[in-house]
């Protein structure tokens, strides 16, 4: 797929006085004659009371066969801020693509018609997009501050799905499928042509592409109550999601995921650039090495050579991971820090095994190898271990596109 050559402009705040609707909230529906009217009226009343800008509510009808179209027509005629569009085919992703593509509002959002997510989170969701702080905002049911009421089956499925995403695609966002998201229109205009899925995997694919491009994703903890009348086919949806993950995984492995045209201007790309990361990684490594030498020398009289070596290496590995997290890859906050440290220690162990294994192999092959030969092998293995450490930190521990609004945050 051909990538767009021109980068996105730098984010800027929206003007305080904006005559046209600043926010367009899309409500995708399919055969929702029972919930549509009370939900839209409740959403409309909430926005009138709390949202300080002009807004629009768009009902996106996914080929409903019940009274949904007539109810949407009546609501649009009665409430000036409400409009509706009709699609001939089903698919939440298809509905969002159509509604967002046709909107001129600077901020585009969507939420599920059952209003499972408490509407008090709507303003915190869109505020970072209006201010120019972030590109995309998502509600998360898995953050520490979230309050969620749902059955054990859905809870397990949700957590397993997001854990699968983190382990297979190395994503940084915590909740891909919460029906509560917003995006700046300039970002949506670049993202939507690249998203292939038109069903439930639409959200995940959009977020993965955005994250890989280095766009900033803001997460908002939400209060969420499960709708017991939900008609989502969990088995069919899960299978479709697995196929989507496999497809995205292949695209990532082949390097064909189109992200260049999504990158922000130069000021947003400096920290994520490979050359800049290599320089910062080298500087952190040099400081870590000096710290190791000083710490080893201080501990040597007390702990002996092996003990002081182990303690110095462990302390410097932890400090090195923390420094690279903040300085090399631009992540801030405590969210995910323990996971990063655990992965960093594993990367450290891999490097230690590589260097120690190389020395052991030399001693096994050439028991009387000279000191110079040993040093040469260790230097070569050390360089290989350093390169491997950088690659693993960049691709696995701190994926270069991970920019989130709460927790890990780019400078």
Image (cartoon, rainbow, N blue to C red):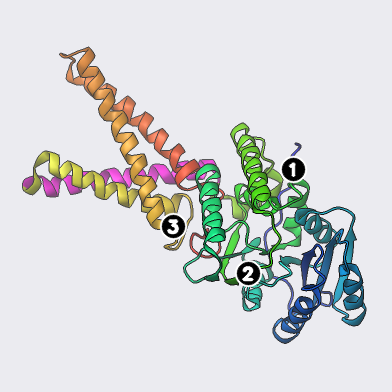
Q: Secondary structure at mark 3?
A: loop
Of the pair 200 and 380, the residue shown nearer to us: 200
The structure residue drawn at horizontal position 54% and vertical position 70%, both measured from the top left corner, is 148
Name the residue at 76% across, 37% down. Answer: 2
- Helix, strand or loop at label 1? It is loop
Q: Nearer the viewer, mark 2 or mark 3?
A: 3
Give SS at disc 2: helix
Residue 400 visible in the current orientation = no
Which stretch appears magenta?
A: 273-301
Look at the image and say whether residue 284 sits in the magenta stretch.
Answer: yes
- Residue that numbered label 2 is attached to: 128
Instruction: Find residue 153 and report its horizontal and vertical position in percent.
Output: 54, 58
Q: Residue furthest left?
A: 301
Hey, which quadrant is residue 219 in on the image? bottom right
Q: Nearer the viewer, residue 291 or 91?
A: 91
Q: Which residue is mark 1?
A: 5
Q: Residues within 10 Å of mark 3 (few under 14, many from 20)?
A: few
Question: Percent from the top left, x then y, of residue 34?
Answer: 79, 73
Residue located 62% across and 54% down the image: 215
> Picture quarter containing residue 67?
bottom right
Percent of width and height locating residue 125: 64, 70
Which residue is depicted at the point 37% across and 46% down?
A: 344
- Locate residue 383, reporting x and y percent: 36, 30
Q: CA distance from mark 3 to mark 1?
A: 33 Å
Q: Which residue is mark 3?
A: 336
């Amino acid at each position: 797929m051909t990538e767009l050559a021109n980068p996105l402009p730098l984010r800027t705040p929206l003007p305080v006085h904006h005559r046209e609707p600043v926010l367009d909230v899309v409500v995708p529906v399919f055969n929702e004659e029972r919930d549509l009217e009370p939900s839209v009226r409740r959403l409309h009343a909430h926005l009138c009371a709390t949202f300080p800008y002009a807004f629009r509510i768009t009902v996106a009808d996914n080929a409903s066969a019940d009274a949904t179209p007539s109810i949407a027509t009546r609501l649009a005629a009665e409430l000036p801020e409400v409009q509706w569009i009709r699609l001939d085919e089903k698919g939440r992703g298809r509905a969002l693509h159509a509604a967002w593509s046709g909107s001129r509002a600077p901020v585009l959002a969507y939420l599920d018609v059952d209003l499972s997510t408490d509407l008090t989170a709507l303003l915190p969701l869109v505020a970072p997009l209006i201010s120019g702080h972030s590109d995309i905002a998502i509600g998360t049911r898995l953050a520490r501050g979230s309050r969620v009421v749902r059955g054990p089956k859905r809870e397990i499925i949700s957590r397993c799905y997001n854990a699968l995403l983190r382990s297979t695609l190395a994503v940084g966002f915590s909740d891909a499928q919460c029906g509560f998201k917003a995006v700046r229109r300039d970002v949506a205009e670049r993202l939507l042509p690249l998203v292939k899925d038109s069903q439930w995997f639409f959200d995940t694919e959009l977020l993965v592409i955005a994250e890989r491009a280095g766009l900033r994703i803001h997460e908002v903890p939400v209060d969420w109550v499960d709708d017991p009348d939900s008609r989502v086919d969990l088995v069919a949806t899960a299978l479709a999601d697995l196929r989507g993950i496999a497809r995205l995984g292949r695209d990532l492995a082949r390097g064909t995921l189109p992200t260049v045209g999504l990158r922000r201007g130069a000021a947003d790309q400096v920290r994520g650039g490979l050359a800049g990361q290599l320089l910062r990684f080298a500087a952190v490594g040099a400081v870590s090495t000096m710290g190791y030498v000083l710490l080893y020398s201080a501990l040597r009289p007390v702990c002996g050579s092996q003990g002081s070596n182990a303690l110095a290496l462990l302390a410097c590995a932890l400090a090195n991971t923390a420094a690279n997290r903040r300085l090399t890859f631009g992540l801030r906050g405590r969210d995910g820090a323990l996971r990063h440290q655990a992965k960093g220690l594993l990367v450290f162990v891999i490097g230690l095994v590589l260097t120690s294994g190389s020395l052991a192999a030399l001693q096994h092959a050439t028991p009387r190898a000279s000191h110079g030969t040993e040093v040469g092998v260790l230097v070569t293995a050390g360089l290989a271990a350093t390169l491997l450490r950088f690659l693993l930190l960049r691709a696995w521990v701190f994926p270069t596109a991970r920019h989130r609004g709460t927790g890990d945050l780019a400078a």
